[in-house]
Image: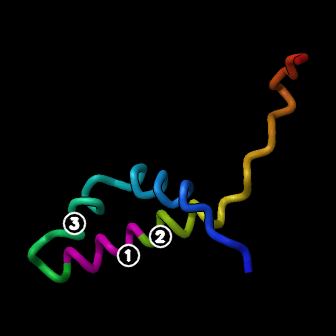
Amino acid sequence: MERIDTSAVAHAILDAPGWARVGITAPSSCIREDAALELGRVIADAVDAPASAPSSEQSILPL
């Protein structure tokens, strides 16, 4: 089993829609559940996303 990158999870939470981040503290259980599902989806997408490979259009700089 592969370890989840906590940095990727943190960035996914910060990049999640504002309503979902705020919604998990809502007094209504329906809103909290919807917000939690959205945050879960955003985090799962970020964790499952393949690492971005360098573009062929990007020039390589010598060191």
Quadrant in which the C terminus appears = top right
Circles 1 and 2 in contact, beta carbons < 8 Å? yes
Tell me the element at label 2. helix
3D distance between C-alphas at marks 1 and 2: 6 Å
Q: Main secondary structure of the magenta part?
A: helix
N-term mark: 3 or 2: 3
Tag 2 residue: 41
Q: Is residue 58 left or right of residue 7?
A: right
N-term mark: 3 or 1: 3
| Image quadrant where residue 34 sits | bottom left
Tell me the element at label 3. helix
Q: Which residues are magenta?
A: 31-39
Please report the residue visible at 54 percent of the width from the left and 54 percent of the height from the top. Answer: 7
Q: Amino acid at mark 3?
A: Gly
Quadrant in which the N terminus appears = bottom right
**In the rendered view, would you say 21 is above or below 63?**
below
3D distance between C-alphas at marks 3 and 2: 14 Å
Q: Which mark is residue 37?
A: 1
Q: Position of residue 13 (x, y in %)?
A: 41, 57
Q: Residues within 10 Å of mark 3 (few under 14, many from 20)?
A: many
Q: Which mark is residue 49?
A: none
Tag 3 residue: 23
Please report the residue visible at 44 percent of the width from the left and 72 percent of the height from the top. Answer: 40
